[in-house]
């Protein structure tokens, strides 16, 4: 059974990692997918993903767009509306980390993380709520992090941005619930992606896995499965929630 048949989804930051996993999962379940990438170096990966998605029998298009730029988000959603006709699902997945101890962190590093991880969620959400309100239906899924719940030394900017996503998510859920628009967050733990590649081998990997009750890092598919649930009618009575997909790390 396809859970997202003919739904239209926008996924930011989907050329690789968690975003790519979500895009593939959505396409497997019948969703048409518009997804973004930001840098020229990701263009080939984005083109390859677009081919994979269309091979699954859905409409798909890659857009080079910066989720941390308000005007770019406005243009993106307008372009998607013109191409796809509607927006049923938004996954705010774009994110970066600039880890540094507080004493060494520069204002520029702080602002770049907040701009990409938190401001982008506001920018994109603001753009999609108009068509969703008109349709009186929609699911917005924001990618937070277990670090936003727990904090972590050397990740003050990342933790702050991801904690902000949680507060924003809950507020949007209360504001738009009467229009049948749901808004939830996912808080992944350590997931096997390029961003965490330096943690996946040797003593560092053993150290982190020792603190995870399930004893392993998660995969992009683990997060994609949770996202699918929240995007589909299976999650129709779930809003304003934070689902920690972290293997029990935050227990």
Image (cartoon, rainbow, N blue to C red):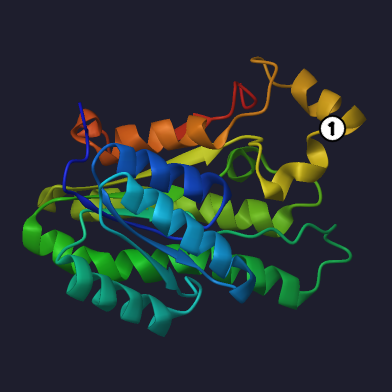
Q: 10 and 189: which one is in front?
A: 10
Residue most extreme to the left:
135
Q: Which residue is mark 1?
A: 201
Q: Nearer the viewer, residue 36 or 227?
A: 36
Return the x and y of residue 42 as percentages of the image width and height: 59, 66
Give the vertical position of 204 relative to 164 (above or below).
above
Q: Residue at x 65, y 25 (%)?
A: 249
The residue carrying pointer 1 sits among few (fewer than 14), some (14 to 19) or many (20 or more) residues within 10 Å by Cα, namely few
Which quadrant of the rendered structure holds the C terminus? top right
As drawn, is 99 to the left or to the right of 23?
Answer: right
Between 30 and 12, the one nearer to me in the picture:
30
Q: Is residue 14 visible?
A: no
Quarter holding the N terminus is top left
Q: Position of residue 126 (x, y in %)?
A: 30, 69
- Residue at (25% x, 50% y) in the render: 58
Residue 201, given in percent of the width and then of the height, sits at 84, 32
Residue at image point 88% right, 63% down = 103
Helix, strand or loop status at disc 1:
loop
């Amino acid at each position: 059974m396809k859970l997202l048949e003919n739904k239209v989804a926008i996924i930011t930051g989907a050329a690789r990692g968690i975003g790519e996993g979500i895009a593939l999962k959505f396409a497997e379940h019948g969703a048409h997918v518009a997804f973004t990438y930001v840098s020229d170096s990701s263009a080939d990966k984005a083109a390859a993903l677009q081919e994979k998605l269309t091979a699954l029998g859905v409409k798909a298009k890659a857009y080079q767009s910066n989720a941390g730029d308000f005007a770019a988000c406005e243009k993106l959603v307008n372009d998607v509306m013109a191409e796809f006709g509607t927006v049923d699902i938004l996954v705010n997945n774009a994110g970066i980390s600039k880890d540094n101890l507080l004493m060494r962190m520069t204002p520029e590093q702080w602002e770049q993380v907040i701009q990409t991880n938190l401001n982008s969620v506001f920018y994109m959400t603001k753009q999609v709520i108009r068509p969703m309100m008109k349709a009186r239906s929609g699911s917005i899924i924001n990618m937070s992090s277990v670090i936003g719940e727990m904090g972590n030394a050397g990740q003050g900017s990342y933790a702050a941005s991801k904690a902000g996503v949680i507060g924003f998510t809950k507020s949007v859920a209360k504001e738009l619930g009467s229009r049948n628009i749901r808004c939830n967050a996912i808080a992944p733990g350590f997931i096997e992606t390029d961003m965490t590649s330096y943690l996946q081998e040797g003593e560092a990997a053993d150290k982190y896995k020792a603190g995870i009750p399930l004893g392993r890092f998660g995969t992009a598919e683990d997060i994609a499965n949770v996202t699918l649930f929240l995007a589909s009618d299976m999650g129709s009575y779930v809003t304003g929630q934070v689902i920690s997909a972290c293997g029990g790390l935050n227990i």
